[in-house]
């Protein structure tokens, strides 16, 4: 059996094992009396569910990793991704209960309430018991476009099962949109399209979290990639800049974090020019279209901009998978040896956001003034956003991975490793492993932050030295 056929069969076997797990150990509407890992293990069929779940992830992830540099063709990649997705498309939700929250937020809007002013418990939502208690009283953290979509879907379906199917179809549409646009971006950046599609869409994160979990990140990513594709198709032209900006505005109207891509999209539309006048012209068109689209969607839904402040509620979850949160946890453990309890997490999170703001400005300036690839700059900006945000969920790794897949030809192994590891951070029923592994998780993540920081500082010093003396010397060079 060839390597490609072996990988396809191994990945399909993993996908089937994961799908089977969904029927008796997935994120079903009934949460159960004890949804913790221990409770899952003690439940009927618990050991089998856990074993199938991690074995399936290992098989699917191993098949993806096996072919990360040797995908035979674009058509083969498309067919394999579709084949692996089919079992997960027909199985109950996995690894997250967010789709139930989407349905309740849509029901809130459909009933005439503003989901940015109260939690779903205020309706009350008919499926309230399917949502984790921590999210029942918090405002919706998603943009007005997705709230509008949620309300329309709930109005069309109204039963919980029908709503899950409809939200999953929206997620599939986002994945298909991404798949359709990736080859054009990859060719522009000199990356083989089949490699880009494989790295971006064949990982376990896509099948488990975007398709089975029906996360709205699928549509956000699809709109981001579509907007960038339109802009780079004819840079410098008003029509593509306005259309691309509108698509990016829709992406921001789903999740606000998409906004970090917009400044780099402006640079992508400059047609190679570094002049300030051209920058301002492209910026006015891209940013203007994005803002106009965002405002139009907000007004059309009869909503307010309260979703911006609602983003703060998404940081209620505390897990060491977020580096700033892990540092705060670790620093908080040290005074406990002296009987002192202090919560340093809010402060380390604020430091992380401040560092992110500086880093985003530096990345943008570096792309503009040094002529670097704006699409790669957008990928790095998303990677920085994921790394320095107060909360990290496994599917967040897909934000930068999709753009890294089309902009990096050879040196993407480090991030594919991160994405593969992130696949194992949550159980099939949606319980996050980080909640029960604060030690050693937080200290180990803190050590990783220190190591990465040291590496980046050394790399920056090397780049500065090369910029100061770009001509390498040899032993024959005369001493100045």
Image (tube, helix red, strand yellow):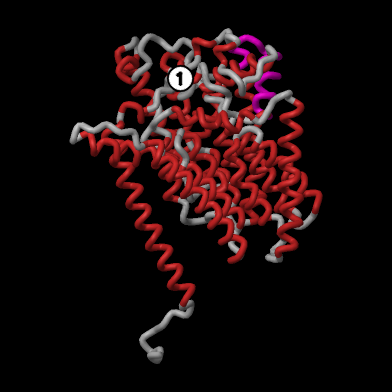
Q: Position of residue 32 (x, y in %)?
A: 40, 10
**Residue at 64% over, 43% down:** 225
**Residue at 41% over, 82% down:** 473
Q: Position of residue 47 (x, y in %)?
A: 31, 18
Which residues are drawn in magenta?
A: 145-163
**Residue at 35% over, 39% down:** 328
Q: Is residue 367 left or right of residue 435?
A: right
Q: Position of residue 215 (x, y in %)?
A: 56, 28
Q: Position of residue 154 (x, y in %)?
A: 66, 15
> In the picture shown, does residue 479 fall above or below 38?
below
Q: Nearer the viewer, residue 92 or 264?
A: 264
Give the tally of numbered discs. 1
Residue 474 highlighted magenta (yes or no): no
Q: Most prominent secondary structure in the magenta stretch?
A: helix
Query: What is the secondary structure assignment of the residue under circle 1?
Result: helix
Residue 418 position by quadrant: top left
Q: Residues within 10 Å of mark 1 (few under 14, many from 20)?
A: few
Q: Quadrant of the N terminus?
A: top left
Residue at mark 1: 134
Q: Quadrant of the C terminus?
A: bottom left
Q: Is residue 384 left or right of residue 34?
A: right
């Amino acid at each position: 059996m060839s390597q490609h056929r072996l990988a396809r069969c191994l990945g399909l076997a993993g996908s089937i094992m994961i799908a089977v797990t969904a029927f008796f150990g997935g994120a079903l509407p009934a949460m159960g009396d004890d949804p913790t890992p221990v409770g899952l293990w003690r439940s009927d069929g618990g050991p089998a569910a856990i074993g199938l779940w991690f074995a399936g992830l290992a098989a699917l992830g191993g098949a993806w990793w096996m072919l990360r540099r040797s995908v035979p063709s674009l058509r083969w990649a498309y067919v394999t991704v579709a084949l692996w997705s089919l079992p997960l498309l027909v199985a109950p939700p996995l690894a997250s209960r967010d789709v139930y929250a989407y349905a309740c937020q849509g029901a809130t809007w459909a009933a005439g309430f503003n989901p940015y002013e109260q939690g779903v418990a205020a309706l009350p939502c008919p499926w309230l018991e399917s949502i984790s208690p921590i999210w029942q009283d918090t405002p919706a953290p998603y943009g007005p476009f997705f709230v509008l979509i949620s309300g329309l879907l709930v109005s069309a379906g109204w039963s919980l099962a029908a709503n899950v199917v409809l939200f999953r179809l929206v997620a599939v549409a986002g994945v298909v949109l991404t798949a359709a646009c990736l080859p054009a971006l990859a060719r522009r950046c000199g990356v083989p399209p089949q490699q880009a599609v494989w790295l971006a869409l064949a990982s376990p994160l896509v099948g488990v979290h975007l398709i089975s979990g029906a996360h709205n990140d699928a549509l956000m990513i699809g709109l981001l990639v579509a907007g960038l594709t339109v802009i780079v198709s004819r840079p410098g032209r008003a029509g593509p800049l306005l259309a691309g900006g509108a698509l990016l505005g829709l992406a921001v109207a789903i999740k606000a974090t998409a906004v970090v891509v917009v400044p780099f999209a402006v640079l992508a539309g400059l047609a190679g020019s570094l002049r300030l006048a051209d920058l301002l012209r492209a910026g006015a068109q891209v940013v203007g279209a994005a803002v106009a689209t965002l405002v139009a969607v907000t007004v059309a839904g009869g909503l307010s901009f309260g979703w911006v402040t609602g983003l703060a509620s998404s940081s209620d979850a505390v897990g060491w998978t977020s580096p700033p949160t892990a540092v705060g946890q670790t620093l908080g453990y040290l005074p406990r040896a002296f009987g002192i309890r202090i919560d340093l997490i809010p402060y380390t999170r604020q430091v992380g956001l401040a560092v992110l703001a500086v880093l985003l400005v530096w990345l943008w300036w570096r792309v503009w003034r040094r002529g670097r690839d704006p699409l790669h700059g957008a990928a790095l900006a998303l990677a920085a956003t994921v790394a320095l945000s107060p909360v990290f969920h496994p599917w967040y790794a897909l934000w930068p991975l999709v753009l890294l897949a089309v902009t990096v030809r050879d040196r993407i192994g480090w991030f594919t490793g991160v994405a593969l590891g992130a696949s194992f951070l949550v159980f099939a029923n949606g319980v996050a492993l980080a909640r029960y592994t604060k030690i050693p998780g937080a200290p180990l993540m803190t050590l990783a932050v220190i190591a990465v920081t040291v590496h980046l500082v050394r790399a920056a010093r090397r780049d500065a030295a090369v910029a100061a003396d770009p001509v390498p010397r040899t032993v024959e060079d005369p001493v100045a």
